[in-house]
Image: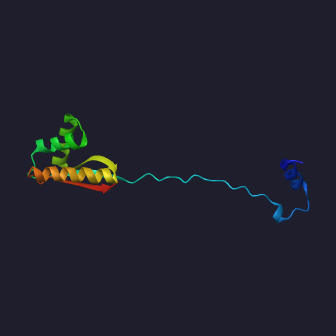
Amino acid sequence: MTQFDLTMANDNDDDRNADDEIAVVTKTKPKTKRPPMYKVMLLNDDYTPMEFVVLVLERFFQINHAQSVEIMLTVHKKGLAVVGVFAFEIAETKVAQVMDFARRNQHPLQCTMEKE
């Protein structure tokens, strides 16, 4: 008798006890969680030239000139604007790059990040 036949015979047996039961173990794949995303924002100030903000947007965020001007005007009018959403390490690097570039060019431009 094959193993299949033995299993079938056991299923038909009225005198089965708990020790005769066959357990099936299945592996489930753990669901991976998406990493949290972070918004990178530029803050308005009264001293940083608008052209410098446009340069920062083009250089560090690869935003085209027209969109950079739009974002710069949003920062100017509303006080801040989200310039990108990134994973933590990338957002942190972008903030550091912008802040360092602004300091080296003697501008008080502020760049921050917050969890989305």
- Residue at image coords 80%, 60%: 21
* Residue nearer the viewer, 115 or 18: 18
Q: Position of residue 54 (x, y in %)?
A: 16, 41
Q: Position of residue 110 (x, y in %)?
A: 17, 54
* Quarter of the image that includes the C terminus: bottom left
- Residue at image coords 84%, 50%: 3
**Image height of 65 relative to 41, above or below:** above
Residue that sits furthest to the right in the current view: 14
So how many labels did they put on this image?
A: 0
Q: Position of residue 33 (x, y in %)?
A: 47, 53
32 sits to left or right of 80: right
14 sits to left or right of 58: right
25 sits to left or right of 83: right
**Image height of 69 relative to 110, above or below:** above
Locate residue 52: give its quadrant. top left
Residue that sits furthest to the bottom in the current view: 18
Q: Position of residue 2 (x, y in %)?
A: 86, 47
Q: Is residue 79 visible?
A: no
Q: Is residue 12 visible?
A: yes
**Image height of 13 relative to 51, above or below:** below
**Image height of 20 relative to 69, above or below:** below
